[in-house]
Image (tube, rainbow, N blue to C red):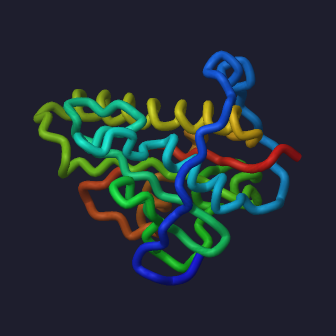
Amino acid sequence: MPATADTPLPPPRLNDCTLRDALRLRRSTRAFGPQPLSDQALSDLLWAACGVNRADTAGRTAPSARHWQEIDVYAALRGGLYRYEPATHALRRVIDADLRALSGEQDFVGAAPLNLVYVADLSRVDAGDEQERRFYTAADAGFIAQNVYLCCAAIGLVTVVCGLVDRRRLAAAMGLRAEQRVLLAQTIGHPP
């Protein structure tokens, strides 16, 4: 990816995999082939995660409590860290460093071609109760992660959600603001 402000992604593909097939094929994997993902696969994954599927309302592929759309999806790649911009279906470079190894405590995360990091921006959440904010942001991140699982199954990739993340260390490396919270990471790649 070039170091421009926004890098457009190719339009997402909709393939012929049925929902039933994707559910049958959905699984967690902790072994990944080393080859990088194509721009098309990255496009498909990010659009499935939380892309705009209803332009008239800016509705997204994943539900969001009270339409807060508070979860930002970051793509940690060998070439740097990018934030997915759903409205333009593009990547915005955030950091030039390779942060893949920081997105989980298991050995495989640093070698996999892609780690998605789900970050809640609490400035978009108007719930006053801390427990309610945690509940809704966790649920919203879970919806996005499941969309990614199903997309991976549909396009022949493998994935696993990583809950074991040093969130403070990763947030510092990502340069997150105080109102942003790392919730989960998801490792993605080709089957070994």
Residue beneath the point at 55% across and 49% down:
12
The answer to which quarter of the image holds residue 131 is top left
Image quadrant holding the N terminus, namely: bottom right
Say which of 42 and 66 sits in front: 42
Residue beneath the point at 59% across and 39% down:
14
Does 120 appear above or below 178? Answer: above
Q: Position of residue 8 (x, y in %)?
A: 48, 68
Which residue is outermost to the right? 192
Residue beneath the point at 23% across and 40% down:
57
Does 190 appear above or below 134? Answer: below
Seen in the image, is 107 located left or right of residue 151? right
Q: Position of residue 163 (x, y in %)?
A: 55, 39
Does 40 appear above or below 164? Answer: below
Which residue is outermost to the bottom? 3
Seen in the image, is 149 located left or right of residue 64? right
Q: Position of residue 32 (x, y in %)?
A: 81, 48
Seen in the image, is 35 located left or right of residue 1? right
The answer to which quarter of the image holds residue 152 is top right
Residue beneath the point at 65% across and 16% down:
20
Q: Position of residue 107 (x, y in %)?
A: 75, 53
The answer to which quarter of the image holds residue 27 is top right
